[in-house]
Amino acid sequence: MAGNILWLLLKCFANVAVMLAVAPLCEGVIRKMTARIQSRQGPPVLQPYMDLLKLLGKEDIESGESPVVQRVAAYLALSMAMLVACMVPMGFASPMSNVADCLVLVYLLTMCGICTLVAGLAAGSTYSLIGISREMMTMITLEPLLAIALVIGSMHTQSFRLNAVLDGSVYTIGGFPWSGLVILLVMIFAFQAFIQRLPFDIAESETEIMEGPLMEYSGPKLAMFKYAQMCRLVILAALFIALFVPFGSRLMFPLGWLIFWAKVLVLILAVTLVAATHARYRIDQAVRYFAALIVVAFVALVLASYGF
Amino acid sequence: MSLLSKAREAIICLKAGKVTLPYPAQPHAPAPNFRGRPIFDAAKCIGCAGCANNCPAREILIFDPCQEIRVLHYLGRRCTYCGRCADVCPEKAITMSQDFETATDKIGDLSQHLELFMSTCQRCGRCFKESSPLEQLKLKGYRCDDLEHEHVIFRSQSYLKDAPVVDDINIELD
Amino acid sequence: MIARERLKALEEQFGVGIERADLAGENRLFVYVRPTMLKLICQHIFRDLSARYVISIGADDRPYNGKFLVAHDFAFDGDNLLCSVLAHVPSEDPKVDSISAVIPAANWAEREIMDMVGVQMKGHPYPKRLVVPDGWPEGVHPLRKDFAWNQVPEGFDDQKEFKFGEPPEGCVVVPFGPFHPTLDEPSHFRLYVEGEMVRGCEYRGFMVHRGIEKLAESVLSYNDIPMMAERICGICGCVHSVAYAQAVESAVGLEVPQRAQYIRTIMLEIERLHSHLLWVGLAGHVLGFDTIFMQAFRIREPIMWISEKITGNRKTYGMCVVGGMRRDLTPELTAELSGVLDKLQTEWRAVVDAVVKDKNIQKRASGVGVADRTLTKEMGLIGPMARAAGVDIDCRRDHPYAAYGKVDFDVITAAGGDVWSRLVVRATEVFQSIRIIRQCLEKMEPGPIEEKVTDDLPVGRIGLSSVEAPRGESHHFLITGENNHPRRWRVRAPTYQNLQAVPAMIKDKPLADMTIALASIDPCFSCTDRLETIDVKSGATRVWSHGIEDLPGATKG
């Protein structure tokens, strides 16, 4: 029993370590590719590591309304990300996938968003409050999409267990997976918003509201949040791949593992291309867009419930 | 959807390639005729103070310690590299160099100091060959700008009747 | 001659009210009126004759004739006529009727006269301080002749703060500036925001006031001032130095050689190119679309290089002096310039074609920051702001200066009056600028580039000059003086007028639109604030409040 638990802990640790190690690299790739599109050199691919190190080395200045809550929010954000990493398969079956279910996954992912809200509230400045109101509107209209995708998957496999759902479950029905394709399309269109990149980085639009919720953050706290955001990118990419394009992940380590990261790379490149060629949307335009996506997602849900 | 225009934009971007230069990792010379830091040639200078009078930023100080010696001190701090000094110099003693990398942590590095022996000059300003009345000397005669505090002392004829001598203010530099 | 006809009509209408008139050539009319008739005559010119209001100027003429001077400049765009209505106000108890009630565009200019010269404007709807800081003592007016340029007034109150109005019901105060990523220069917009909608705005600006006009009157000489004028703005510097030089030349009747006129035109158009490309990039950046920013700057860079080759500097050209230019264009430079223009045209054409169909940008820019024809007329808006609202004015065509009378070009207008229209107007004007430069290069003949001034310049002459900056009309008013410097120099940058329309543009619109609406007027706060600061001790912050409630005709929030 103890051996099992130890083994479980070790696998969790490995998962988390891999994620923590690779997340800044993904961010670096995004920055480098954005720079190439913008006809410039760009920072080295390893720059985010150096940024995080630099931030961690800075003085932890207390600014904002409630510094304690700010600190808590920062640690919570990163912890949530690390926890979710234990549950999401990243090239091999995740350690907790046969004990956790997808409802917990949804809750934990929502917690990450709530951490941003708490951060903005704790900062207390006008701009951060505007930022969190935008973030709230975005969350309300966006998180349901992921939930619906997971529900569709669980409807098909008749189980909430993660290892069942996160395995291309949206396609696992007898005939042509209509609901699967519809929800795939919806998620493709919504993915940019999930990872908070242009054109949907409304909550933290630099030119309009000066970074919004993260406004009063600096030094180590900012490093935590930035890290949490980078990890979010990897986690959501992993989720997307596990749900919709799991082909090839079942192969033997290391081939399956390499294929997984190749897919993540392709996803990131697509994200960068879209982010670099779009202007930011206004919150009301974005909310209308998400609302339209929700309607389509519900159609997919209905289809799934009828067995399509 | 504006997919097509986005695609066109992306193609424009990617066709352009990388255009940023690795300056300052690699040096980058400015164009010829670039107006950089002015260099004062003491050998050619006749001490007419035409440059000091026509410097819009008042960065050239003139001080006459005695009958024979005139000190010309170019401060260089607020110099805008406009090149008017080089334009009006009758002896072409000032050249605008190509030097623009003038950042330094010691402000004294920017200044140039000329000490000129003036033969039998009465400081009338006759040496300055102005090209038009617009470039006439504002201040003639002996000049005693404050070299220690680096101020120009205006003793010009003010347009105010009964105007007292208008002195420069003391700015505390710490 | 149109000017003579206009003068005759005015004399018939107002008879005794007009004391004297100067017809300085076909295009300049100076009408000296009785101070009591000033408002009536200005009203007539603005409303009945449909002239465009340009600026109001105050000057201290007490050493010369014992009175203060108040002048209001108007432009008859269709007639190529710039007209100045001047009144001498007695120095004991200087008061004159304000024209802001009938000409809303004069709001700021009159407050500036009140602050700087001390002539009271009776009946001004909002007589609060504009330019001098709050702590500035009462009754001390910097532009008066008995106030030295480096004088520090006694009684400056460091602690006195500005009293902003109360925010309307249910609104949160969002301070926009002086620090904000979108603002290039410090200014303060105090927004009253309800949810995401802006319900009102108070502006507090003039933080970059540097005392240019006082310096020009005291310690700079005629040929020093173009260097200073160039540094009024980092983007439209050439415009100001040319406008100043033209004002002096117009005042004293100095003919500038042909070749210098062509070179001036070329440099002005090169400046327009770089400014519009910069603006398109900036607008993209404000919208979050950094790629357009990078690409616009990439395409713009060759212009900076050729400017460096021609003038010696990328931006502060330092080319203009009174009477001509300092440097000439060699044949090699001409050939190189043509090459740069060809490449620019192809690349920009590709970008414009792609951007014009881009729905993503259009969504953020259409219907945003609308300034319609009425607002344009009332507030005297100029430049691409006006042209985007369908108002067809352009100083290059209406009041030709330099070599613009000799080249063909189209004036680009659009109909929407919103940010998108302004983007289209500016992006398309680039091609017209290229066309103008090409024609100038063709038509230029060899010859002298500077008209040497041989005598002292005459004293007491007034010169007006309007130059089309990339942002609109830049108007300089100059009175020549003794000792080789002017008596009065007033710079009216285009942003001075255009900024006054911002509160109206952002009212009842989402907060997210505020930044792009502000950026769309292509604001140049340095140009706007250029006036006075000689207050070394305090760091002079200007304070002004312009609630939306105070715009005549605006509905209360």
Image (spheres, rainbow, N blue to C red):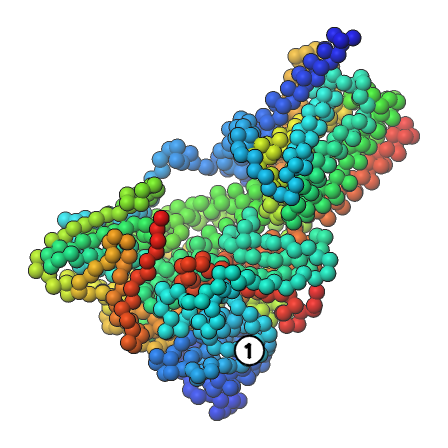
Horizontal relation, residue B153 to residue A126: left or right: left
**At x 24% / y 58%, what residue is drawn?**
B145
Relative to A83, residue C28 above or below: below
Q: Is residue A56 visible?
A: yes
Mark 1 nearby-residue class (10 Å; few <14, some 14–19, many ≥20):
many
Left or right, B147 with reference to B20: left
Return the residue nearer the eye: C316 or B114.
B114
Q: Secondary structure at mark 1?
A: loop
Is residue C92 positioned above or below B80 on the image? below
Instruction: Look at label 1 and name its amino acid.
Output: Ile
In depth, the one of A133 and C523 nearer the eye is A133
Q: Identify the image quadrant of residue A51.
A: top right
* Closer to us: C369 or C262: C369
Please state, as top left, top right, bottom left or bottom right, where the N terminus of chain C lies in the image.
bottom left
Q: Position of residue C418 (x, y in %)?
A: 63, 58
Looking at the image, which residue is at 70% across and 11% down?
Answer: A252
Considering every residue shown, the one lying at the far left of the view is B120
Instruction: Name the residue tied to disc 1.
Output: C99
Q: Tell me which corner region of the image, top left, top right, bottom left or bottom right, holds residue A116.
A: top right
